[in-house]
Image (spheres, grey):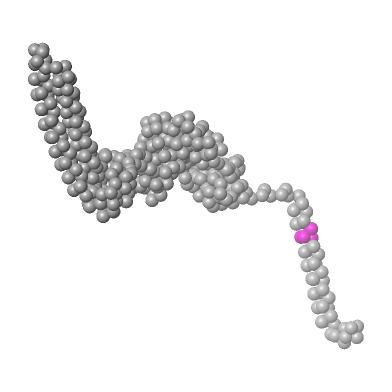
Amino acid sequence: MNRFLEHLPVNLFRQRRSVAAILAIFVVASLGGYALASADKKADPAPEQVSAKAVLTVKLIKPTVMEWAQQIAANGNVLAWQESQIGTEIGGLRLVEVNAQVGDVVKKGQLLARYNDETLKAEVAQVKASVEEAEAALNEARENANRVRQLGTSGSLSAQQITQAMTQERTAQARAQSAKAQLTTAQVRLNQTRIVAPDDGVISSRSATLGAVSQPGQELFRLVRKGRLEWQAEVTASESARIAIGQQATLTLANGQIVHGTVRQIAPTVDTKTRNLIVYVDLKNDEQRSAKPGMFAKGQIAVGQGKALTLPGSAVLLRDGFANVFVIDSAAKSGASKVKQVRVKLGRQAQGMMEVAGIAPDAQVVAAGAGFLADGDTVRIVK
């Protein structure tokens, strides 16, 4: 290297020394600026941390206290108020006429079916003839008895003749009464060939078959009396103490229809197996067309009025199978606030409002958008 420098021109060597000096000065200046900057950094206090950015702008509401109907939830079956079994009392006759089908609305006394009555008509005619014969014999016996009574005081008739005449009169009278009783029986049997509706109602079942031979006690039809249906709701013994006759009930059928009713009767005993009792609710006639006997229905029985703490449905978040709301936890200096997730218990629901329990009446609750929040998030509040 030295040999290389010796062969260089003197001017170039001098230029090289000037450049090196300049570079040295620049390095010294840089180190000085770094030292001053470090000193300033140590002298200045730490800057204030930037506040967390709000994740959502929300509006706050407070729970509303409302006068709300208190209800008892119940389940049960829709059944006929009373279902009559219509059958026959006679046997050995053939069914020759069927006039009613399932679903027909019938009136009391309306002819539903008829058996062959020719034999019984002949029997009635025969008994009527026997009655006339007995009445004729009775009239003759009475005339004889009256003559005996008139002659009895004269002494022309013996006591035996008088007794015989009186006996014949009483015998004829008994035979006439017996014939009339037989006629009544024959007419009853004839009437039994006509199967009529015992009351107004709706035919719910038919087992009558044209041409079938009757058997005593055989069921032919079933009738829902007056077309009335009832809801037999099961409630617990403790809840039954709040139920009274005349209270209103609302039930939802399996097809989604809403039907209203009135409590008619409360069972006096509790089922020993289920520990429940039955509440009988009469359904309104103009609404029960959609209800059918045997349907299962859920409903509520209104037992009075009471105060309830409510929130709109938009403020309630269903998460992980639980109901939650977000309330303001604490306010930050920057004007933003943090929210806290609070689990609540839901009660009744109506007209978009929900009954809630588990928060204070003066709590500030996020009105909407709870699905976008998490516990501890910072929000910005707007009026």
Residue 375, placed above or below residue 3: above
Q: Is residue 97 left or right of residue 344?
A: left
Image quarter for residue 193? top left
What range of the chain is rendered magenta? 32-36
Q: Residue furthest right?
A: 2
Whether residue 65 can be seen here:
no
Q: Residue furthest bottom?
A: 7
Which percent across, then down, holds residue 279? 43, 35
Q: Is residue 14 left or right of residue 179?
A: right
Q: Is residue 255 left or right of residue 41?
A: left
Q: Residue at x 53, y 48 (%)?
A: 318
Q: Residue at x 38, y 37 (%)?
A: 281
Which percent across, then down, holds residue 29? 78, 63
Residue sitting nearer the eye, 279 or 314:
279
Does the magenta-highlighted stretch encompass residue 332?
no
* Quarter of the image that includes the N terminus: bottom right
Q: Residue at x 81, y 64 (%)?
A: 28
